[in-house]
Image (tube, rainbow, N blue to C red):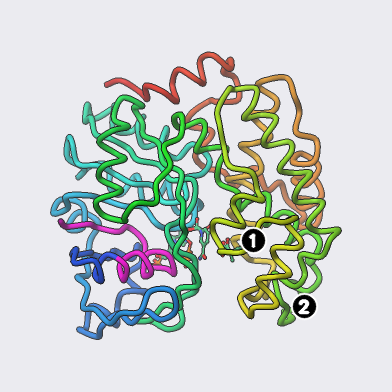
Protein backbone atom coordinates (compact mmCIF):
# COMPACT_ATOMS: atom_id res chain seq x y z
CA UNK A 1 0.00 0.00 0.00
CA UNK A 2 1.39 3.41 -0.96
CA UNK A 3 1.27 5.85 1.93
CA UNK A 4 2.26 9.45 1.21
CA UNK A 5 3.32 11.42 4.24
CA UNK A 6 3.00 15.19 4.00
CA UNK A 7 5.76 16.45 6.25
CA UNK A 8 9.37 15.45 6.76
CA UNK A 9 10.10 16.10 10.42
CA UNK A 10 10.60 13.76 13.36
CA UNK A 11 7.14 12.22 13.23
CA UNK A 12 7.04 11.88 9.45
CA UNK A 13 10.47 10.18 9.50
CA UNK A 14 9.40 7.94 12.39
CA UNK A 15 6.17 6.89 10.68
CA UNK A 16 8.00 6.30 7.38
CA UNK A 17 10.50 4.08 9.20
CA UNK A 18 7.72 2.18 10.96
CA UNK A 19 5.82 1.61 7.70
CA UNK A 20 8.94 0.51 5.81
CA UNK A 21 9.73 -1.99 8.53
CA UNK A 22 6.19 -3.36 8.27
CA UNK A 23 6.55 -3.85 4.51
CA UNK A 24 4.61 -0.81 3.26
CA UNK A 25 6.04 1.78 0.90
CA UNK A 26 6.00 5.30 2.28
CA UNK A 27 6.66 8.49 0.33
CA UNK A 28 7.80 11.65 2.10
CA UNK A 29 7.05 15.20 0.99
CA UNK A 30 8.81 18.16 2.58
CA UNK A 31 6.93 21.42 1.91
CA UNK A 32 10.15 23.36 1.30
CA UNK A 33 12.03 20.38 -0.10
CA UNK A 34 14.80 21.03 2.43
CA UNK A 35 14.28 18.08 4.73
CA UNK A 36 14.19 15.44 2.01
CA UNK A 37 17.17 16.66 0.00
CA UNK A 38 19.56 13.99 1.30
CA UNK A 39 16.96 11.20 1.08
CA UNK A 40 16.15 12.25 -2.49
CA UNK A 41 19.80 11.85 -3.41
CA UNK A 42 19.54 8.15 -2.48
CA UNK A 43 20.69 8.10 1.13
CA UNK A 44 18.66 5.68 3.29
CA UNK A 45 16.49 6.69 6.21
CA UNK A 46 17.91 5.35 9.47
CA UNK A 47 15.73 4.92 12.54
CA UNK A 48 17.07 4.03 15.97
CA UNK A 49 15.46 3.46 19.35
CA UNK A 50 11.92 2.11 19.56
CA UNK A 51 11.97 1.53 15.78
CA UNK A 52 15.23 0.17 14.38
CA UNK A 53 15.54 0.08 10.62
CA UNK A 54 17.43 1.33 7.60
CA UNK A 55 15.17 1.87 4.59
CA UNK A 56 15.08 3.52 1.22
CA UNK A 57 12.01 5.75 1.08
CA UNK A 58 10.52 7.51 -1.92
CA UNK A 59 10.60 11.29 -1.95
CA UNK A 60 8.02 13.39 -3.78
CA UNK A 61 9.29 16.65 -5.20
CA UNK A 62 5.83 18.20 -5.40
CA UNK A 63 2.70 17.83 -3.30
CA UNK A 64 0.81 16.78 -6.43
CA UNK A 65 3.18 13.86 -6.99
CA UNK A 66 2.79 12.73 -3.37
CA UNK A 67 -0.98 12.96 -3.32
CA UNK A 68 -2.03 11.73 -6.79
CA UNK A 69 -0.10 8.51 -6.42
CA UNK A 70 -1.19 7.54 -2.95
CA UNK A 71 -3.55 4.91 -1.58
CA UNK A 72 -3.48 6.77 1.74
CA UNK A 73 -2.29 10.30 2.58
CA UNK A 74 -1.05 11.28 6.02
CA UNK A 75 -0.51 14.81 7.35
CA UNK A 76 2.31 14.69 9.90
CA UNK A 77 3.65 18.12 10.73
CA UNK A 78 2.94 20.88 13.25
CA UNK A 79 -0.50 22.51 13.08
CA UNK A 80 1.00 25.84 12.01
CA UNK A 81 1.74 24.12 8.68
CA UNK A 82 -1.64 22.40 8.29
CA UNK A 83 -3.47 25.13 6.38
CA UNK A 84 -0.63 25.56 3.92
CA UNK A 85 -0.28 21.82 3.36
CA UNK A 86 -4.03 21.18 3.14
CA UNK A 87 -4.36 24.02 0.61
CA UNK A 88 -1.53 22.46 -1.41
CA UNK A 89 -3.04 18.96 -1.30
CA UNK A 90 -6.75 19.62 -1.81
CA UNK A 91 -6.62 20.21 -5.59
CA UNK A 92 -5.13 16.73 -6.09
CA UNK A 93 -6.92 14.60 -3.49
CA UNK A 94 -9.11 11.94 -5.05
CA UNK A 95 -12.57 10.88 -3.96
CA UNK A 96 -12.34 7.92 -1.61
CA UNK A 97 -8.60 8.19 -0.84
CA UNK A 98 -8.35 8.34 2.97
CA UNK A 99 -6.45 11.19 4.61
CA UNK A 100 -5.05 10.59 8.11
CA UNK A 101 -4.31 13.62 10.26
CA UNK A 102 -1.70 12.52 12.78
CA UNK A 103 -2.06 14.41 16.06
CA UNK A 104 -5.12 16.32 14.95
CA UNK A 105 -5.58 19.75 16.49
CA UNK A 106 -7.61 22.88 16.08
CA UNK A 107 -10.31 21.36 13.88
CA UNK A 108 -7.93 20.92 10.96
CA UNK A 109 -10.20 18.09 9.77
CA UNK A 110 -13.11 20.51 9.47
CA UNK A 111 -10.96 22.87 7.43
CA UNK A 112 -10.01 19.99 5.12
CA UNK A 113 -13.64 18.87 4.88
CA UNK A 114 -14.74 22.40 3.98
CA UNK A 115 -12.14 22.74 1.23
CA UNK A 116 -12.98 19.29 -0.20
CA UNK A 117 -16.70 20.11 -0.20
CA UNK A 118 -15.98 23.13 -2.39
CA UNK A 119 -14.47 20.69 -4.91
CA UNK A 120 -17.31 18.25 -4.32
CA UNK A 121 -14.79 15.57 -3.38
CA UNK A 122 -15.80 13.14 -0.68
CA UNK A 123 -13.26 11.03 1.23
CA UNK A 124 -12.79 9.68 4.75
CA UNK A 125 -10.75 11.95 7.00
CA UNK A 126 -9.17 9.91 9.79
CA UNK A 127 -8.07 11.81 12.87
CA UNK A 128 -5.73 10.66 15.62
CA UNK A 129 -5.56 12.15 19.10
CA UNK A 130 -1.79 12.05 19.02
CA UNK A 131 1.13 10.58 17.10
CA UNK A 132 2.05 6.92 16.56
CA UNK A 133 5.64 7.56 17.64
CA UNK A 134 7.54 10.24 19.53
CA UNK A 135 11.09 11.27 18.80
CA UNK A 136 13.52 13.73 17.33
CA UNK A 137 15.19 14.05 13.95
CA UNK A 138 18.85 13.35 14.57
CA UNK A 139 20.14 14.32 11.11
CA UNK A 140 18.90 14.96 7.58
CA UNK A 141 18.43 11.22 7.14
CA UNK A 142 17.91 9.85 10.64
CA UNK A 143 15.41 9.80 13.45
CA UNK A 144 15.67 8.73 17.07
CA UNK A 145 12.31 7.16 17.97
CA UNK A 146 11.66 7.45 21.70
CA UNK A 147 8.44 5.47 21.87
CA UNK A 148 5.75 3.71 19.84
CA UNK A 149 2.49 4.32 21.62
CA UNK A 150 0.50 1.39 22.94
CA UNK A 151 -2.84 3.11 22.37
CA UNK A 152 -3.97 5.72 19.87
CA UNK A 153 -7.39 7.36 19.79
CA UNK A 154 -9.02 7.46 16.37
CA UNK A 155 -12.21 8.83 14.80
CA UNK A 156 -13.34 9.85 11.35
CA UNK A 157 -15.08 12.67 9.54
CA UNK A 158 -17.75 11.83 8.61
CA UNK A 159 -18.41 9.59 11.60
CA UNK A 160 -20.07 7.12 9.24
CA UNK A 161 -16.58 6.15 7.95
CA UNK A 162 -15.52 4.91 11.41
CA UNK A 163 -15.30 1.20 10.52
CA UNK A 164 -13.31 1.87 7.37
CA UNK A 165 -10.94 4.23 9.20
CA UNK A 166 -10.37 1.86 12.10
CA UNK A 167 -9.66 -1.10 9.81
CA UNK A 168 -7.23 0.86 7.65
CA UNK A 169 -5.29 2.18 10.65
CA UNK A 170 -5.09 -1.30 12.20
CA UNK A 171 -3.86 -2.79 8.92
CA UNK A 172 -1.11 -0.18 8.59
CA UNK A 173 -0.12 0.40 12.18
CA UNK A 174 -1.27 -2.62 14.19
CA UNK A 175 -3.66 -3.35 16.97
CA UNK A 176 -3.39 -0.18 19.01
CA UNK A 177 -6.38 1.95 18.01
CA UNK A 178 -9.16 2.99 20.34
CA UNK A 179 -12.30 4.19 18.60
CA UNK A 180 -13.51 7.52 19.92
CA UNK A 181 -16.85 9.15 19.49
CA UNK A 182 -16.14 11.45 16.56
CA UNK A 183 -14.03 14.47 15.74
CA UNK A 184 -15.01 16.39 18.84
CA UNK A 185 -13.60 13.65 21.08
CA UNK A 186 -10.34 13.72 19.13
CA UNK A 187 -10.17 17.52 19.21
CA UNK A 188 -10.31 17.16 22.99
CA UNK A 189 -7.86 14.24 23.11
CA UNK A 190 -4.60 15.81 22.00
CA UNK A 191 -2.83 16.35 25.32
CA UNK A 192 0.33 18.01 24.08
CA UNK A 193 -1.10 21.52 24.52
CA UNK A 194 -1.94 21.10 28.21
CA UNK A 195 1.34 19.32 28.96
CA UNK A 196 3.34 21.86 27.05
CA UNK A 197 1.54 24.81 28.61
CA UNK A 198 2.64 23.57 32.04
CA UNK A 199 6.15 22.68 30.94
CA UNK A 200 6.81 25.79 28.84
CA UNK A 201 5.21 28.39 31.10
CA UNK A 202 6.96 27.15 34.21
CA UNK A 203 10.33 26.71 32.48
CA UNK A 204 10.22 29.69 30.14
CA UNK A 205 13.49 31.22 31.26
CA UNK A 206 15.34 27.93 30.70
CA UNK A 207 13.98 27.90 27.16
CA UNK A 208 14.76 31.54 26.51
CA UNK A 209 18.32 31.20 27.84
CA UNK A 210 18.89 28.07 25.73
CA UNK A 211 19.70 25.90 28.73
CA UNK A 212 19.99 22.14 28.47
CA UNK A 213 17.35 20.80 30.83
CA UNK A 214 15.52 17.56 31.47
CA UNK A 215 11.87 17.89 30.47
CA UNK A 216 10.62 14.93 32.51
CA UNK A 217 12.85 15.80 35.47
CA UNK A 218 11.37 19.29 35.59
CA UNK A 219 7.80 18.08 35.76
CA UNK A 220 8.09 18.55 39.51
CA UNK A 221 5.06 18.03 41.76
CA UNK A 222 3.99 21.68 41.28
CA UNK A 223 4.24 21.49 37.47
CA UNK A 224 2.43 18.14 37.55
CA UNK A 225 -0.41 19.58 39.63
CA UNK A 226 -0.77 22.47 37.19
CA UNK A 227 -1.01 20.04 34.25
CA UNK A 228 -3.60 17.97 36.15
CA UNK A 229 -5.66 21.12 36.81
CA UNK A 230 -5.55 21.99 33.10
CA UNK A 231 -6.63 18.45 32.38
CA UNK A 232 -9.62 18.80 34.71
CA UNK A 233 -10.85 21.71 32.55
CA UNK A 234 -10.46 19.65 29.37
CA UNK A 235 -12.25 16.67 30.93
CA UNK A 236 -15.12 18.89 32.08
CA UNK A 237 -15.61 20.17 28.51
CA UNK A 238 -15.49 16.61 27.12
CA UNK A 239 -18.00 15.55 29.79
CA UNK A 240 -20.36 18.33 28.79
CA UNK A 241 -20.27 17.16 25.16
CA UNK A 242 -20.75 13.57 26.36
CA UNK A 243 -17.55 12.32 24.71
CA UNK A 244 -15.12 9.93 26.33
CA UNK A 245 -11.43 10.90 26.32
CA UNK A 246 -8.31 9.58 28.00
CA UNK A 247 -7.06 11.31 31.19
CA UNK A 248 -3.60 12.87 31.22
CA UNK A 249 -2.48 10.14 33.63
CA UNK A 250 -3.65 7.39 31.23
CA UNK A 251 -1.95 9.25 28.37
CA UNK A 252 1.43 9.25 30.13
CA UNK A 253 1.21 5.67 31.32
CA UNK A 254 0.16 4.27 27.91
CA UNK A 255 2.40 6.49 25.80
CA UNK A 256 5.57 6.18 27.77
CA UNK A 257 5.19 2.75 29.34
CA UNK A 258 5.38 3.79 33.00
CA UNK A 259 3.14 2.61 35.86
CA UNK A 260 0.15 4.84 36.61
CA UNK A 261 0.81 7.61 39.13
CA UNK A 262 0.54 11.36 39.31
CA UNK A 263 1.77 13.30 36.27
CA UNK A 264 4.88 14.28 38.21
CA UNK A 265 5.57 10.77 39.48
CA UNK A 266 5.37 9.33 35.96
CA UNK A 267 7.65 12.02 34.51
CA UNK A 268 10.14 11.51 37.35
CA UNK A 269 10.10 7.78 36.62
CA UNK A 270 10.78 8.43 32.91
CA UNK A 271 13.62 10.70 33.95
CA UNK A 272 15.08 8.05 36.31
CA UNK A 273 15.04 5.58 33.41
CA UNK A 274 16.87 8.11 31.19
CA UNK A 275 13.76 8.66 29.06
CA UNK A 276 12.73 12.08 30.35
CA UNK A 277 13.88 13.83 27.19
CA UNK A 278 15.25 17.34 26.90
CA UNK A 279 13.11 20.45 27.08
CA UNK A 280 13.05 23.05 24.29
CA UNK A 281 16.08 25.33 24.08
CA UNK A 282 14.33 28.30 22.50
CA UNK A 283 11.07 30.14 23.00
CA UNK A 284 10.48 29.83 19.25
CA UNK A 285 9.30 26.32 20.05
CA UNK A 286 6.24 24.45 18.83
CA UNK A 287 5.45 23.88 22.53
CA UNK A 288 4.28 27.48 22.39
CA UNK A 289 3.88 28.48 18.75
CA UNK A 290 1.84 25.38 17.90
CA UNK A 291 0.26 24.38 21.19
CA UNK A 292 -1.09 27.74 22.33
CA UNK A 293 -2.78 28.93 19.10
CA UNK A 294 -3.82 25.49 17.84
CA UNK A 295 -4.48 23.56 21.07
CA UNK A 296 -5.06 25.72 24.14
CA UNK A 297 -7.03 28.37 22.23
CA UNK A 298 -9.52 25.99 20.55
CA UNK A 299 -10.11 24.27 23.90
CA UNK A 300 -10.81 27.67 25.46
CA UNK A 301 -13.23 28.40 22.59
CA UNK A 302 -15.07 25.13 23.34
CA UNK A 303 -15.31 26.14 27.01
CA UNK A 304 -16.92 29.43 25.98
CA UNK A 305 -19.34 27.73 23.59
CA UNK A 306 -20.72 25.56 26.39
CA UNK A 307 -20.74 28.39 28.92
CA UNK A 308 -18.03 26.81 31.09
CA UNK A 309 -14.97 29.02 30.59
CA UNK A 310 -11.67 27.15 30.84
CA UNK A 311 -10.10 29.71 33.13
CA UNK A 312 -6.61 28.20 33.32
CA UNK A 313 -6.48 27.75 29.53
CA UNK A 314 -7.55 31.36 29.01
CA UNK A 315 -5.08 32.62 31.62
CA UNK A 316 -2.29 30.59 30.04
CA UNK A 317 -2.94 32.23 26.69
CA UNK A 318 -3.04 35.72 28.25
CA UNK A 319 0.17 35.22 30.23
CA UNK A 320 2.10 33.67 27.34
CA UNK A 321 0.80 36.31 24.89
CA UNK A 322 2.01 39.01 27.30
CA UNK A 323 5.41 37.29 27.51
CA UNK A 324 5.60 37.19 23.69
CA UNK A 325 4.30 40.73 23.28
CA UNK A 326 1.63 39.62 20.81
CA UNK A 327 -1.67 37.80 20.73
CA UNK A 328 -0.79 34.14 20.17
CA UNK A 329 -4.38 33.25 19.25
CA UNK A 330 -3.99 35.35 16.09
CA UNK A 331 -1.55 32.71 14.78
CA UNK A 332 -4.40 30.22 14.34
CA UNK A 333 -5.10 30.37 10.60
CA UNK A 334 -7.64 27.50 10.62
CA UNK A 335 -10.37 28.71 12.96
CA UNK A 336 -11.23 31.97 11.12
CA UNK A 337 -12.28 29.95 8.05
CA UNK A 338 -14.64 27.86 10.18
CA UNK A 339 -16.41 30.49 12.28
CA UNK A 340 -16.64 28.01 15.15
CA UNK A 341 -16.68 30.73 17.76
CA UNK A 342 -20.15 31.82 16.68
CA UNK A 343 -21.64 28.31 16.60
CA UNK A 344 -23.99 26.73 19.09
CA UNK A 345 -22.84 23.52 20.78
CA UNK A 346 -25.44 21.58 18.76
CA UNK A 347 -24.32 22.99 15.39
CA UNK A 348 -20.70 22.26 16.25
CA UNK A 349 -21.56 18.68 17.22
CA UNK A 350 -23.43 18.19 13.96
CA UNK A 351 -20.62 19.52 11.75
CA UNK A 352 -18.08 17.43 13.69
CA UNK A 353 -20.17 14.34 12.94
CA UNK A 354 -21.06 14.95 9.29
CA UNK A 355 -18.46 17.38 7.96
CA UNK A 356 -19.28 19.83 5.17
CA UNK A 357 -21.34 18.74 2.20
CA UNK A 358 -20.44 19.74 -1.36
N1 LIG B 1 8.10 14.84 17.94
C1 LIG B 1 7.34 14.29 18.89
O1 LIG B 1 7.80 13.50 19.72
C2 LIG B 1 5.89 14.60 18.96
C3 LIG B 1 5.26 15.38 18.03
N2 LIG B 1 3.92 15.60 18.12
C4 LIG B 1 3.24 16.41 17.10
O2 LIG B 1 3.45 15.85 15.81
C5 LIG B 1 3.50 16.90 14.82
C6 LIG B 1 4.80 16.81 14.05
O3 LIG B 1 5.86 16.97 14.96
P1 LIG B 1 7.38 16.88 14.51
O4 LIG B 1 7.52 15.98 13.36
O5 LIG B 1 8.18 16.63 15.73
O6 LIG B 1 7.63 18.38 14.03
P2 LIG B 1 8.81 18.95 13.17
O7 LIG B 1 9.07 20.33 13.62
O8 LIG B 1 9.96 18.00 13.17
O9 LIG B 1 8.14 19.02 11.71
C7 LIG B 1 8.86 19.52 10.67
C8 LIG B 1 8.02 19.45 9.42
O10 LIG B 1 7.00 20.46 9.49
C9 LIG B 1 7.08 21.27 8.33
N3 LIG B 1 6.69 22.64 8.65
C10 LIG B 1 7.09 23.39 9.68
N4 LIG B 1 6.52 24.61 9.61
C11 LIG B 1 5.75 24.62 8.51
C12 LIG B 1 4.94 25.59 7.89
N5 LIG B 1 4.76 26.80 8.40
N6 LIG B 1 4.29 25.26 6.75
C13 LIG B 1 4.44 24.03 6.21
N7 LIG B 1 5.21 23.07 6.75
C14 LIG B 1 5.87 23.36 7.88
C15 LIG B 1 8.53 21.19 7.92
O11 LIG B 1 8.61 21.57 6.59
P3 LIG B 1 9.98 21.47 5.74
O12 LIG B 1 10.12 20.01 5.41
O13 LIG B 1 9.67 22.31 4.57
O14 LIG B 1 11.06 21.96 6.64
C16 LIG B 1 8.83 19.73 8.19
O15 LIG B 1 8.40 18.91 7.13
C17 LIG B 1 3.33 18.19 15.60
O16 LIG B 1 1.97 18.54 15.60
C18 LIG B 1 3.76 17.83 17.03
O17 LIG B 1 3.18 18.61 18.03
C19 LIG B 1 3.16 15.09 19.14
C20 LIG B 1 3.74 14.32 20.10
C21 LIG B 1 5.13 13.99 20.08
C1 LIG C 1 8.43 15.20 24.05
C2 LIG C 1 6.99 14.77 23.99
C3 LIG C 1 6.89 13.32 23.61
C4 LIG C 1 6.40 14.99 25.37
O1 LIG C 1 6.27 16.35 25.62
C5 LIG C 1 6.13 15.51 23.05
O2 LIG C 1 4.95 15.42 23.23
C6 LIG C 1 6.59 16.33 21.95
O3 LIG C 1 7.73 16.30 21.53
O4 LIG C 1 5.72 17.03 21.41
Residue 85, x across and y down, in percent? 36, 51
- Indicate yes or no whether the magenta region holds residue 14: yes
Secondary structure beneath dot 2 equals loop
Tell me which numbered mark, 2 or 1, is placed earlier along the sequence.
2
Q: Position of residue 287 (x, y in %)?
A: 63, 60
Image coordinates of residue 172 in percent, x first then y, are 26, 54
- What is the span of residues highlighted in magenta in the rendered image? 1-18
Q: Are marks 2 and 1 in contact (CB under 8 Å)?
A: no
- Kindly state the secondary structure of the residue where label 1 is placed: loop
In the foreground, 54 or 341: 54
Query: Measured along the vertical axis of the image, is residue 191 above or below residue 219?
Result: above
Taking the spot 48% from the left edge, 28% from the top edge, the residue there is 338
Task: Locate ligand 2 by image quadrant.
Answer: bottom right
Q: Residues within 10 Å of mark 2 (few under 14, many from 20)?
A: few
Q: Nearer the viewer, mark 2 or mark 1?
A: 1
* Quadrant hosting residue 93: top left
Q: Which residue is mark 2?
A: 209
Residue at 24 percent of width and 57 percent of height: 4
Quadrant housing residue 98: top left
Residue position for label 1? 259
State whether residue 330 is above or below residue 31: above
Give the percent coordinates (x, y) of residue 277.
Answer: 62, 74
Amino acid sequence: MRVSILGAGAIAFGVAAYLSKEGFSPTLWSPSGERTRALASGEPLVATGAVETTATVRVAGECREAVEDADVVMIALPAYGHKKVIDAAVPYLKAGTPVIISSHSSFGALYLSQRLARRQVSLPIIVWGTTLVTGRQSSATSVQVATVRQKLDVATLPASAADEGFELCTKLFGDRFVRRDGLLAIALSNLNPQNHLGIALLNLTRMEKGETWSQGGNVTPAVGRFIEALDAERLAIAGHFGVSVRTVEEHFSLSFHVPMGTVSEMNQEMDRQGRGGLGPTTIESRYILEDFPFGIFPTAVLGKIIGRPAVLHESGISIMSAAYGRDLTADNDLLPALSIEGMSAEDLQSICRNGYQG
